[in-house]
Image (cartoon, helix red, strand yellow):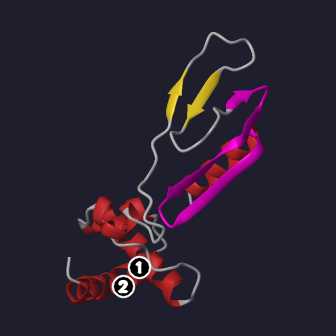
Amino acid sequence: MDKFVMDIRLESWIPIFEEQIKSGLSKHDFCRQNGISKGAFFKWQKIFREKLAREAGYLDTPPTPAQSFNDSSGEKPAFFELATTSSSDCAMEISDSRAEGRPCISGGTIDTSLAAMSITYGGFSINVSGNVDEQILLSVLKAVKHA
């Protein structure tokens, strides 16, 4: 969608967001009473919040689809194969063709001493290397998912 068109549509949603706040109704009830699609309401609310956050300097401008597949380093995204093993030391392995060794998830920690992993989701990027506590990584991933 053209940025100009997007801005115009967003401008038309701002009074709706303000009206919902003034009404004291939940977002779901407000949408139901006013015949507004909940999906559209939440989609435009998210776009509005992201725009405000970017303008305030809290978010970087999101990459275009072309940039997200070819970053400035020229590397393409790596895919990690998760497979069970028969080894009692390791319940799962993460393989990366660029890594010399194969890290292992074992005993609640991820040993990535021979490999590094970069996880990108939305506007967030998490780089993992060395030993990482599995529960901490899980908590970080959940927080990023719900941010």
- Quadrant position of residue 44: bottom left
Q: Residue at x 45, y 68 (%)?
A: 25
Q: Position of residue 77 (x, y in %)?
A: 43, 53
According to the picture, the residue beneath numbered tag 1 turns out to be: 48
Between circles 1 and 2, the one closer to the viewer is: 1
Counting other residues with Cα less than 10 Å from the Cα at mark 1, is it few (<14), some (14-19), or many (20 or more)? some
| Mark 1 residue element | helix
| Mark 2 residue element | helix
Counting other residues with Cα less than 10 Å from the Cα at mark 2, is it few (<14), some (14-19), or many (20 or more)? some
According to the picture, the residue beneath numbered tag 2 turns out to be: 14
Closer-to-camera residue (6/95): 95
Decide: is 140 above or below 65. above
Instruction: Give the numbered dot on residue 18.
Output: none
Quadrant into which the N terminus falls: bottom left
Decide: is 76 above or below 101. below
The reply to whether residue 30 is visible in this rendering is no
Quadrant into which the C terminus falls: bottom right
Is residue 36 a member of the stretch shown in magenta?
Answer: no
Closer-to-camera residue (123/27): 123
